[in-house]
Image: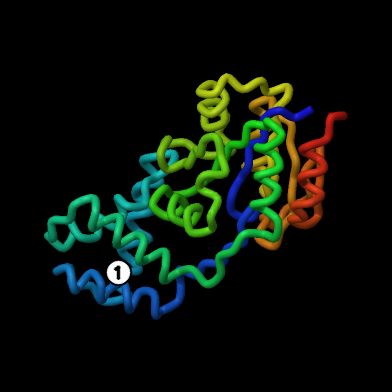
Amino acid sequence: MYKTCIFDFYGTLCDIRTDESKPELWEKLSLFYSFNGADYTPEELKNSYFRIVSELEKEFREIQIERVFKELFIRKDVPADDTLAIHTGQFFRILSIEHLRLYDGVKEMLEKLRSSGRKVYLLSNAQRIFTEYELKYLGIWFSFDDIFISSDHNSKKPDIEFYNKLIEKHDIDVSTAIMIGNDGTCDIAGAKSAGLHTLYIKSDISPDEPIPEADHLLLEPDMSKLAEILLSEDD
């Protein structure tokens, strides 16, 4: 029996589409920066954004995206506190989102797991300033016993360190724990390296990859079937 269920978020519980390339995003974001004293053309802002992201990714295993938005102010000699940087990042995220919804039955599935006594955790490669608010918007922020977001830990899947932080904090018995995700490398291979059982869900936003060797496989995000597997007493 699986006593602990660890979930990925995007592509596993949630269907999301974002587009960071569309011109109107950079037009509106450059206007936001200008309103706050940092004059950018849309093209200059876009190029500077991706350049700073690249710089930080060379220095850190996982970045905090708000640092990028703060640095964009600093490079125009505009003092920006953390609050402004976070609000700028969230405005960027809102502009980029084209579609955001839970897969059908997610709330009911999570409730069944918790009602059965299972421990339920979220382990996501994500940015706190985006994901916390999206979880709250979608109504599942309080559906987990704990939430681990990679931007908080300077580590991300498939790093075993990120898995072990969750495992060690909650003294999880990996022999009765399972990772559920839609990415063969980050969620399945990474979880196996940490000694966890695995369940792979192929979703529309799964990477273009061969089906990984997982303990369980779902070819679509079917939450009823997922609940059946996780609530089985015969694993």
Is 181 drawn above or below residue 203 in the view shown? above
Left/right placement of residue 73 relative to residue 29 reads: left
- Residue, far front: 115
Q: How is the image coloured?
A: rainbow
Is residue 58 or residue 190 the one in the foreground?
A: 190
| Disc 1 target residue | 45
Residue 71 visible to the viewer: no
Left/right placement of residue 23 relative to residue 142 reads: left
Q: Quadrant of residue 172?
A: top right
Q: Residue 1's spot in the image, x, y percent?
A: 79, 27
Query: What SS does tag 1 mark?
Result: helix
Is residue 47 or residue 235 the one in the foreground?
A: 235
How many numbered tags mark residues here? 1
Q: Residue 37's spot in the image, x, y percent?
A: 14, 69
Q: Residue at x 68, y 37 (%)?
A: 115
Q: Residue at x 50, y 53 (%)?
A: 135
Q: Residue 158's spot in the image, x, y percent?
A: 59, 37
- Residue, far right: 234
Q: Residue 34's spot in the image, x, y percent?
A: 19, 73
Residue 154 visible to the viewer: yes
Q: Quadrant of residue 8?
A: top right
Please state, as top left, top right, bottom left or bottom right, where the C terminus lies in the image: top right
Is residue 147 or residue 71 the one in the foreground?
A: 147
Q: Residue at x 59, y 49 (%)?
A: 9
Q: Amino acid at mark 1?
A: Leu
- Crowd tier of the residue under label 1, counting other residues whose Cα lies within 10 Å: few below 14, some 14–19, many 20 or above: some
Q: Residue at x 13, y 56 (%)?
A: 79
